Image (spheres, rainbow, N blue to C red):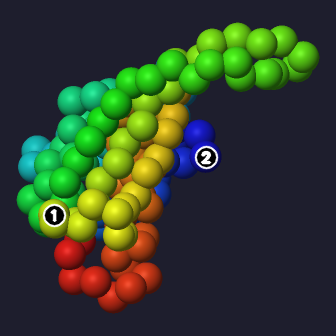
Amino acid sequence: MDNDEIRIKIAELKGVEYEVIHFIEGDELCIKDDDNAYMPIPNWSVNIVDAWELVEEMRESGYVFDLRARREQNIVMEGENYNHDRWSCECHPFGTITTKAILETADTAPRAICLAWLEWKLTCSANNDSTP
């Protein structure tokens, strides 16, 4: 999933009504503010400030949250070994360390948060859990 697909999926799951606005610089996903001016929807998968909104939503619903940076050793791509920095985002209901844990990894912290939030939201919806 690319960043725009993540933005659209999160916006839809949050119930945000957006429009694609065509600017000279390119298309942008926008919402209207109170003055009917177009504002870009948050770029949750790129901007850590926007992504942290998702963390707070999970925390407010009773989920414990852990974000870690780690270096994966000896990744082999196209015949070459290299070290690769990854971020992991883990969340689970308070008091349940091993059950219902969600763990997502990505190249950036905001993207890892978004993937965990999407999994959290979709899992809770599929289980008819009232948490989200």
Residue occupied by mark 1: 94
Q: Element type at marker 2?
A: loop
- Tell me: residue 74, above or below residue 29: above
Residue lying at 16% horizontally and 63% vertically, measured from the top left: 94
Residue lying at 49% horizontally and 39% vertically, measured from the top left: 105
The answer to whether one can see residue 20 in this image is no
Q: Position of residue 116 (x, y in %)?
A: 40, 52
- What type is the residue that disc 1 sits on? Phe
Q: CA distance from mark 2 to mark 1?
A: 29 Å
- Residue 34's disc is none
Residue occupied by mark 2: 1
Which label's residue is closer to the chain start, 2 or 1? Answer: 2
32 vs 83, left or right, is left
Crowd class of label 2 (few under 14; some 14 to 19; many from 20; radius 10 Å): few
Q: Position of residue 88 (x, y in %)?
A: 42, 37
Q: Position of residue 60 (x, y in %)?
A: 9, 59
- Tell me: residue 125, above or below residue 64: below
Residue lying at 81% horizontally and 22% vertically, measured from the top left: 77
Q: Element type at marker 1?
A: loop
